[in-house]
Amino acid sequence: MMKSQPPRRGFKPSLAQQRENATNLAIGALGFIASEPEELDRFLSLTGIEAESIRAAAREPGFLLGVLDFLANDERLLVVFADRSSLAPEEIGHARAILAGAA
């Protein structure tokens, strides 16, 4: 997963850039879930989405937010994803808040 550049000191990314970063993080999370067969099965079961429909569903508003919700609701999975992505777990929560429009 590509990690975004850290912001320069005193520089706050625009809301559009924050949203893009959050979207990219969620796409990476979806790839992570897809690489774990048991987690993918659980995700598909919980969302009711068929595996063949993931690409189309990913274009729907709220889907990527749901991906981050899925991670946030499983601390073990959240920590594994954060570790593999060289992220602090809090960054995933922040990305979730941005996608939810709360940040």
Image (cartoon, helix red, strand yellow):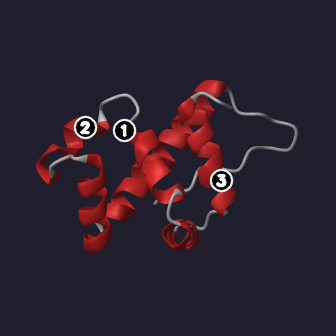
Mark 2 secondary-structure assignment: helix
**Which residue is at a point 24% across and 64% down the rendered structure image?**
41
| 60, 5: nearer the viewer | 60
Q: Disc 2 designates what residue?
A: 57
Say whether disc 3 or disc 2 marks the residue closer to the N-terminus: 2
Q: Quadrant of residue 10?
A: top right
Mark nearer the N terminus (1 vs 3): 1
> Residue 45 placed where, x, y %?
24, 56
**85 w.r.t. 30: above or below:** below
Type of amino acid under label 3: Glu
Residue 3 quadrant: bottom right
**Horizontally, is 46 left or right of 1 in the view?**
left
**Residue occupying the point 45% across, 60% down:** 1
The foreground one among 18 and 97 is 97
In the image, what residue type sits under mark 2?
A: Ala
Q: Position of residue 9 (x, y in %)?
A: 86, 44
